[in-house]
Image (cartoon, rainbow, N blue to C red):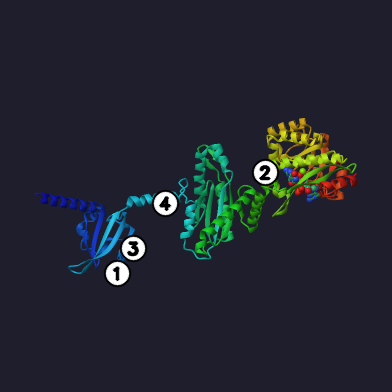
Amino acid sequence: MNETSNKTDQKKFQYEIEKMINDLTMIIVFNHQGIIQYVNTRFIEVTQYTQEELLGQAFTDIFTDDFSTMVKQAANNKQKWTDDIRQQKKDGTHYWVEANFSPIIDNATENEYYVLIQREITERKKHEQMMERLAYIDPLTNFPNRNYMKKWIMDKQDAADTEITILFIDIDRFKAINDNFGHDIGDQVLITLAKRLKKSIHKEAFICRYGGEEFIILLQNQSKHEKNLLLNAILHAIREPVRIDYHELLLTASIGISSGYPFQKDSERIAVLEDLVKKADIAMYHAKKQGISNYHFHSSNQIREMERTYQIELEVRDALERNEFSLVYQPLINLKTNKIVGVESLLRWDNRLLGKVSPMEFIPILEETGLIVPVGKWILHSVCHQMMSWQQQGLFLQRVSVNVSPLQFRDPHFVSNLKEILHEARLDAPYLELEITEGTLLDIENSAKKLHDLKELGVKVSIDDFGTGYSSLSYLKQLPIDTLKIDKSFIDDLDRDGKIIVNTIISMGKNLQFRIIAEGIENSDQFKYLQQQQCHEGQGYFFSRPVESDRIEELYHSLQ
Ligand code: C2E
Ligand code: MG
Ligand code: MG
């Protein structure tokens, strides 16, 4: 009894297991001629063929051509294999399986058979495809993303001499759209612009959303003329007004272009592509510098320029600690008496690696990095001590002027620091003049308050490079400003049409009680003309180049 029940249990168990396998796997057996000998119910359920339609049929009639070829090859080589395969049902729809193929020999007859065991994995494949989509497709625009661009360049079967051109497109001032209209509108703008970009390019061109408001288009083997046409078409397409809800937005783009040959070495495709993207990005930055809605072709000079800027940025950081800064002084001359009345201090930098670097190059970097605040403090400190030391030597200059950059001027501690520095150097405030530019005055509220605080402290203020900005003389008159320095470019133009401007500044400026200085006087004609116009003071190579502090004593006596 016990033995019988054991046997029944075992059979039942075996049956359950077989049923489970049958429910999960599809089994197909065919002979060496490729004729199907057996299919299980699961295969019939999935493919929707009837048993009659399958048994006795040629394997190749039921399965896709690719798959049949694989199976035939494996059968010939008597190989086992496992792979993920896409199969077709009777109605033509597809499903995915993980297929195991193995040849078996029937020992009794010595006939050879082939068994194909398949497990359906359509859901897993769908999930994988969705994940792949997420990794490669930008959900907002449905464009490929930057990862896909790399995959594209790797997968592409192109000749080594195929030239790829990168258009790096950046929507100008896009941040303002997000800030003013919100991110939803910003997103819709991007979708609209993406559609327009897609429309303006050929089918073979590859387009991707590279980042926020940046798109990249990859072109192959296009002439410069074709590129120019396309670039203009793109800029034009972007400029069309974008209407969203009741808003009408006007946008422009800047495009940087670079070209190269990524297909020359397979192992370097990605590196070459990344280098081209970097170059196109730099060119885009130059396009923006030229003004909005512009394009710019990359040139190797720009890379050198960027590298130098980068190196300056790196080196200037510790220049103060390394004592690499120094100051030179350029005399300010009274044009009536020809006497030296003051000096302007000018910063110099002699770097251990780069040598002497022009202030025109490194001061904007000091500004961008905020380093101008500590360096500016050092300048003021050094200049005030220098002025005191000259006074102690019996050298009585009416004033020393110091250039103050906008960021330094905006520093909330600027006035209090200056007060401390003057106090510490025991220098009377009226001996110091600060040179600011018209740009600094744009931040009206803040600068007016600072100017009044400075006035109270007793230091003088002059407007440097006057005439290059937009401030009117009558506006300046409302502020406590002492001196206007006419920009060098007008003095350069005196023998052309600069006279009218210079005369106007001098006569109006004098009426409004400003002291007027002409900068950059290089020859006696300019000097005489300015003298005639009764410009108060002058500065320039004609009198003296900027010199080190110890040479000022000499000049003081020779220019007396
Ligand atoms: P800036 O304040 O307008 O200084 C005048 C510039 O013109 C100086 O150039 C000076 O050397 C140059 N210069 C003077 N006379 C002549 C001339 O006759 N012909 C020619 N061709 N040039 C002349 P530098 O020293 O290279 O300074 C350039 C600019 O860098 C300055 O323009 C100023 O904006 C900035 N800078 C210089 N030193 C400082 C500083 O200590 N602090 C700040 N914030 N900026 C400074
Ligand atoms: Mg100056
Ligand atoms: Mg100037």
| SS assignment at label 2 | loop
Report the residue marked by disc 4.
Answer: 132
Expressed as whole percent of the image width and height from the top left, the position of residue 345 reads: 78, 44
Quick one: SS at disc 3?
helix
Q: Residues within 10 Å of mark 3 (few under 14, many from 20)?
A: few
Visible residue check, residue 469: no
Q: Which numbered disc, 1 or 4, marks the residue that appears first in the sequence?
A: 1
**Label 3 residue near ligand 1, CB within 8 Å:** no
In the rendered structure, find residue 66 and report the number of the disc placed on it: 3
> Quarter-wise, where is residue 397 in the image?
top right
Q: In whole angstroms, how far apart are the C-alphas of marks 1 and 4? A: 35 Å
Mark 2 or 1: the one toward you: 2
- Which residue has dot 1 on it? 76
Q: Amino acid at mark 3?
A: Asp
Q: Amino acid at mark 2?
A: Leu
Spatial CA distance of label 2 from label 3 is: 66 Å
Q: Amino acid at mark 1?
A: Asn
Question: Disc 1 or 3, which lies upstream in sequence?
Answer: 3
Query: Residue at coordinates 16% horizontally, 52% vertically from top-left?
Result: 10
538 on left or right of 302: right
Secondary element at tag 4: helix
Indicate whether 352 appears above or below 68. Answer: above
Q: Is residue 310 left or right of residue 52?
A: right
> Residue 93 placed where, x, y %?
31, 54
The residue beneath circle 2 is 371
